[in-house]
Image (cartoon, coloured by chain):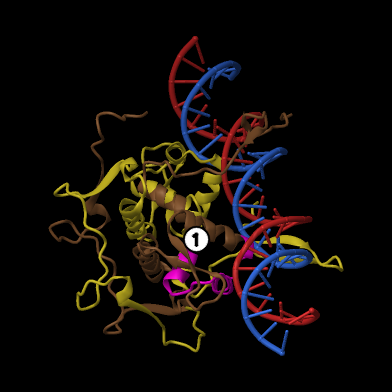
Chain colours: A yellow, B brown, C blue, D red
Amino acid sequence: MMQPHKAVIGRDPRGEPILVKRKSLEDAECPIARSLDAIGDWWSLLIVRDALLGRRRFGEFQKSLGLAKNILAARLRLLVDKGILKPAPASDGGAYLEYVPTPKGRGLFPVLVALRQWSEAFDEAPEEIATVLVDRDKGRPVRKLELRAQDGRLLGFADTVLRPKQTSVRSRRA
Amino acid sequence: MMQPHKAVIGRDPRGEPILVKRKSLEDAECPIARSLDAIGDWWSLLIVRDALLGRRRFGEFQKSLGLAKNILAARLRLLVDKGILKPAPASDGGAYLEYVPTPKGRGLFPVLVALRQWSEAFDEAPEEIATVLVDRDKGRPVRKLELRAQDGRLLGFADTVLRPKQTSVRSRRA
DNA sequence: CTCCTATGGTTGCATTATTAAACCAGATTG
DNA sequence: CAATCTGGTTTAATAATGCAACCATAGGAG
């Protein structure tokens, strides 16, 4: 069985095994690092995207993404472990599991929208993008994501600042 | 018994075997896949985060992130290639390069905010998150990112739909 | 029931990526 | 001009990925 974050990376001069984790970000203080620890690999977010588009079954994901089946199996296990997908018996009475996004999984929607809009704005070949995200009611493209202050002012990157939380005597990393 | 398997997928002009490479997503039609092709690995987004926080130099990134120097060098090259960072002579007159975010790099700000807010909302140990993103003027936490329709209605995941773009008559590639 | 096929994986193994550490060149300091 | 700092590259190891083979279960045909 795979042990994702532990490995012997070598022996010291006395032959002692040196045990080191693959860099894991799960106990970082930075929330961005923490989120990347859950979904920061090549495939996880794409699986979540597919799940939010309504795909549910192993074969659907595999066909849609074209990734190796062992990798897909490992990723699905990870996403289930992290509470992003939940396994459920097949809704059509079939014999196999379905993988359904949890609220935590649906909570990634803004992340996916942000990535989409970044591509739309900065990609070098935007004409190759095949889809548009539209408002279901009116069928018109959505606006860009907006970040606002509590009083409603629209905020850009330069209008924000990262402040240490005051709850404990932690050293600040950023 | 299984035959020894060689993952040779072709031959280059000199007859050397072309071997399996990592999947590239750069010509996907999905803009999320396209963005992940640029910044979808373990470290790139964290480097961008650091750059947006004002870090500029190789040593600053390395100390902050704690990643191997060869990996950092490779990632910086990649981010420069993708137009996310731009190398510039050191602003303090020193001899080395600085890596400065371009507009495309600053355009990742909403992605970083979305990831941060996802952690804040769903992380199992949110008390370990050390910082808050605040409005610079008032010093108060920002609101959650908002997705709106063109007429201003606030949109959730279920209020949107992905629509195929109307493509030109000509290139209807399979 | 047996054979055949489809689905949903696991296993084996070659290749690639990541890592820590050693090394190195140019710039800065003593 | 030696020592040290900065900014990397090289080396050698482990971990992750990709692909095809293999397997287990379910359903249908004969």
- Position of residue A33 in the picture relative to residue B142 (left or right): right
**Is any part of residue A22 visible from this angle?**
no
Query: Which of B94/A130 is in front?
Result: B94
Provide residue D1's location: percent of width, then percent of height: 79, 79
Query: Which of B158/A31 is in front?
Result: A31
Chain letter of disc 1?
B
Position of B17 relative to A18 (above/below) = above
Q: Which residues are magenta?
A: B43-70
* Three-letter amino acid code of the residue under disc 1: Ser
Provide residue A174's location: percent of width, then percent of height: 47, 78
Q: Residue at x 31, y 41 (%)?
A: A130
In the rendered image, residue B47 lying in the magenta stretch gets the answer yes
Q: Quadrant of residue B138?
A: bottom left
Position of A135 relative to C6 (above/below) = below
**Is any part of residue A10 visible from this angle?**
yes
Q: Residue at x 31, y 54 (%)?
A: A121
Query: Which of A117/B148 is in front?
Result: A117
Q: Can you name the residue that lies furthest to the right here?
A: A14
Provide residue C17's location: percent of width, then percent of height: 60, 52
In the rendered image, residue A104 lying in the magenta stretch gets the answer no
Count residues near mark 1 (Cα–Cα under 10 Å), then give few for <14, some for 14-19, many for 20+: some
Chief SS of the magenta region? helix
Position of A71 relative to A38 (above/below) = above
- Position of residue A81 in the picture relative to residue A150 (left or right): right
Provide residue A115's location: percent of width, then percent of height: 36, 55
- Position of residue A140 in the picture relative to residue B41 (left or right): left
- Numbered circles on residues, count: 1
Secondary structure at badge 1 equals helix
Per the image, the residue denoted by label 1 is B44
Q: Residue at x 85, y 65 (%)?
A: A15
Query: Which of C25/D10 is in front?
Result: C25
